[in-house]
Image: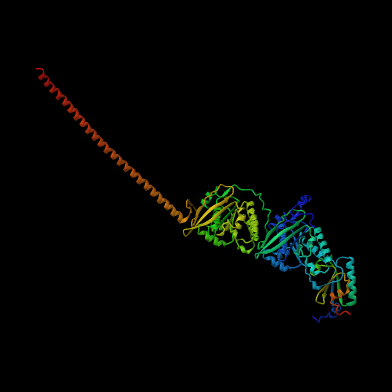
Amino acid sequence: MGKHTVPGIVEGHEVAAAQLSKAPTGITGLDDLTLGGLPCGRPTLLCGSAGCGKTLFALTFLVNGVVDFGETGVFVSFEERPEDLDANVASLGFQLADLVAAEKLVIDHVHIERSEIEESGEYDLEGLFVRLNYAIDRVGAKRVVLDTIEALFSGFTDSAVLRAELRRLFVWLKEKGVTAIITGERGEGQLTRYGIEEYVSDCVILLDNRVEDQVMTRRLRVVKYRGSAHGTNEYPFLIDQEGISVLPITSAGLEHCVSHEAVPTGVAGLNDMLGMKGYYRSSSVLISGLAGTGKSTFSASFVNAACERGERCLFFAFEESPDQVIRNMNSVGIQLKRHVDAGLLKFEAARPSLYGFEMHLARMNRDIERFKPDAIVVDPISAFRGPSSEIHATLVRLADICKSRGITAIFTTLSSPDDPANESQRSVSSLMDTWISLADVEANGERNRVLYLLKSRGMDHSKQLREYQLSSQGIRLIDVYVGPEGVLTGTARIAQEAREHDASIQRQQLTARRHREMVRKRELVEARIAEMRTELEMEESEFQTLVDEEDTRETMRRSERGAMGAIRGHHSDR
Amino acid sequence: MTSDPGDAKRMTAQYRLRLFISGSTPRSTRAIENLRRICEEHLEGCYDLEIIDVYENPEATRDLQVIATPTLIKLLPEPSRRTIGDMSDRDRVLAGLSLLANAPR
C-alpha cells in the first residue's frame, strides 16, 4: 500500500495518467487541491474522528453532484436515520427530501441491531450488495456514499468474513463505475478504526479537528491520491451556513503578475510620501500603530477613495461592527454608508474568538471568491490568536491569494507600547510591500500623532517623520519640525515655531540698530573731519596772513634802507 | 382482534418466517434445507415460511433491513428476531426463533 505513490511526487508513468478523469466535489478549495476532484469511478476513503464533518462532506459531494454536475447519487447511512440527516443539513440549505422526491437522490438507512441478530453458520453480505445495486440502478447513480461502513463491524462478529466482503464491495464499486466516498472513524495508530484503508487505495482524505487555546480548527489532508498530483499539506477548512470551504494553496505561489499601477491611498499627503503617488495595485500594506492612532481611519480613507473610483472593497472587521465603523468614520468625514448602499463596499464582521485563525482565513478566502473585490481591509490582524508561525503561514496564504487576484490588501495591526515591533508584526512584515508605522509622540502633556514609512518596496519613498491630524475633514499630514532639539509636534512645534519667529525679529532689530549706529558714527567722523579741515584752513589762512605781513615788512625795510643810504652818501662826498 | 374468525388458521401459522437467500448457491440451498428441517421438528403445522431471493426481489432487502444472506427473520410472534448464516447451528437457529428455552435439554 502506498508504494506506487509518494505524496506530492508524481512518478513518471503516472504523469500520463494525470489525465485521470475526476469527479468535482463542488467544495470550494478541495477541487483545487486535488486538481479537479475525486477519482472518477473509484472509491475514496474519507476518515476522521467524531464530529469532524465526514457526513457533511460526503453529503455535500452528493448534493453538489445532483445540483451542479447532473450526477445522481445514493447515500447509504449506517448511522443516522434519513430524517436526522435531513434535519442536520437543512441548515445548510440542502433540501434532501426534494432531491429524493425528484428521484435524484436515494437515501438508504441500513439499520443494524446487534442484539437482534443470531449467527448460525456461514453468511455473506450479498444482501447489502443487492440493496446497493438496486438503489444505484433506480436513479442511475454516479455517486455513492457509504457512511460509516465500519458500523458493520459492530453488527457482525465474524470479522474475517466482513473484511473479505468489504474487499469485494470496493472492487464491486469500482466495477460498477461509481465515484464513491466511504467514511471511516479515525483509529489508534491507523487511519480508520478497523483498518479499511487497506481496501481503499485510490484516494484517502483525512479530516481533523484540533482544539488549541480553546479554539477549534478543522483541517483536511489528502493522504494519498493514486495517479494524480495533489496538495500534500494540511489545509484548514470551514463549515458554516454556507457549507464547506477548504482554503487552497494552489493560489499560494510567487508566480503572480505584478502591477505597475498605483492606487491612491486616499490621504493626500501620504500619496506624496510614496514615490508612486499611492500603493502599488495588488500589493500588501501593513499599517501598524498603537491604540487610537487611526489605523482604521487610514484603511477607511483608502476604501473610500477606492469606492469613489468605482472599485469594489471588502472590509473584514474583527473589532467593530459594520455600523460602528460607518458611524465612527462619519466623524472624520469619511462617508462609507453610500458605498455600502451602492454595493461597492461589503463588511464582514466577526469576533476573532469565534473561530480559529485558520478558520477565519478560510472564511475570508471564500468571501473574497464570492465578492471579487479590488481591495480588502483586514482590521486588525493582531486580533488573531495563535502561534506566530501559524499566523505567518496563513497570512502568507491570504497575501498570496490577494496578490494572485490583483487585490490590494490593507492589514492593520495593533502594536504594544513597550514593544513597537512585536513578534507577530516582525513575522508578517516580511510579507508586506509597504509598511506604514503610526506612532504617538508624548510631550508637554499632550499626545500627537506621527507617521513614517518603514518600507515601501519598489518605490522611492519619503523617509521623513510626518505629523498628522484626524479632523472632521479626514486625515491631514503636517510637516514635522525636525531641528537641533529633536522632533517636535503639536503645541511644542507651534511654540518652537513662535520662538524662531521672535528670534528672527530680534536679529532684524539688532541689525537695524547696528546699521543706525554705523550711520551715526560715520556722521560723527565726517563731522570731525570737517571740523579739522576748517581748523586746518584757518591755520593755513593765519599762516598766509603772517607770510603776507612779513613780505610787507620786508618791502618796507628795503625801501627805508635805500632812503637812508642816499642820505648818508651825500653827506660824505662834501 | 382475538375473536377473529380465522383464529384456528392463525394458530397453525403462529410463526411467520422469512428467509432471504441469494440465488441458488450451495449455501442458499443448505440454509433452506436446514431451516425446513428445524421447523418441521419444532414448529410442525404452525409456521408460515416464505423464501425470498434477493436478486428477484431487491426492494425487500430495504424494507426488512437485510444485509447478510442468508437471513432468517422471525416476524411473528414478536419480538422480531433475525438469524444469519446457513442455519447449520441448530441451537442458534432455535435461539433466533425464541424456542431454545422451551426446547428439551
Q: Is residue A559 above or below residue A21?
A: above
**Percent x, y of residue B17:** 84, 73
Q: Quadrant of the C terminus of chain A?
A: top left
**Percent x, y of residue A19:** 76, 51
In the rendered image, the residue lying farthest to the left is A574
Q: Is residue A318 above or below residue A505?
A: below
Q: Quadrant of residue A62?
A: bottom right
**Percent x, y of residue B34:** 90, 72
Q: Residue at 44% of width from left, 53% of height from top?
A: A496
- Which coloring applies here? rainbow
Q: Could you tell me if residue A145 is visible in this image?
A: no
Q: Quadrant of residue A367?
A: bottom right
Q: Could you tell me if residue A495 is visible in this image?
A: yes
Q: Quadrant of the N terminus of chain A?
A: bottom right
- Residue A550 as seen in the image, left or right of residue A403: left
**Percent x, y of residue B4:** 81, 80
Name the one closer to the observer, A385 or A524.
A524
- Residue B18 as seen in the image, left or right of residue A513: right
Q: Is residue A76 above or below residue B46?
A: above
In the rendered image, the residue lying farthest to the bottom is B3
Total numbered labels: 0
